[in-house]
Amino acid sequence: MALIAAILGMAKALKLETVVEGVETREQCSAVTNMGIGCIQGFLFSPPMPLKSLESMVSESGILSHPLRLPR
């Protein structure tokens, strides 16, 4: 957690957006959320998947108000 806090401090000072990868448990998610991270990915949310599957999942969820277009 000390390493994450140090990296976050540097990223904030440089005005960089941060993404925490490899979040596998609710405890990890809670910890990084409490540190101010808003962008998190990992097995807690979904295993890796092919691009077509991701596009379908996002489109079907209705979370976007416009069609999903990811770079190829």
Image: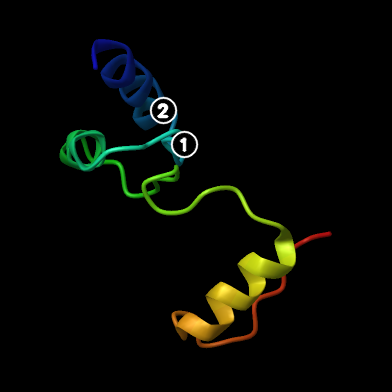
Q: Which mark is residue 16?
A: 1
**Which type of secondary structure does the marked residue at label 2 adopt?**
helix
Up-down relation of residue 5 to residue 19 (above or below): above
In this view, the residue farthest toward the right is 72
**Which type of secondary structure does the marked residue at label 1 adopt?**
loop
Q: Residue 61 carries which label?
A: none
The residues bearing labels 1 and 2 have C-alpha atoms spaced at a distance of: 5 Å
Q: Report the front residue among 14 and 7.
A: 7
Residue 72 in percent (x, y) is at 84, 59
User: Quadrant of the rendered structure where residue 56 is?
Assistant: bottom right
Residue 26 in percent (x, y) is at 22, 43
The disc, 1 or 2, on the residue closer to the chain's N-terminal end is 2
Residue 43 in percent (x, y) is at 44, 44
Residue 46 vs residue 50: left or right?
Answer: left
Q: Residue 11 carries which label?
A: 2
**Marks 1 and 2 close (CB-CB < 8 Å):** yes
Q: How crowded is mark 1: few (under 14 residues within 10 Å), some or many (20 or more)?
A: few
Q: How crowded is mark 2: few (under 14 residues within 10 Å), some or many (20 or more)?
A: few
Up-down relation of residue 61 to residue 28 (above or below): below
User: The residue under label 1 is which amino acid type?
Assistant: Leu
User: Quadrant of the rendered structure where residue 71 is?
Assistant: bottom right
Name the residue rendered at 44%, 80% in the picture: 63
Up-down relation of residue 24 to residue 10 (above or below): below
Quadrant of the image containing the N terminus: top left
Residue 60 in percent (x, y) is at 53, 84
Name the residue rendered at 35%, 37% in the picture: 24
Up-down relation of residue 40 to residue 5 (above or below): below
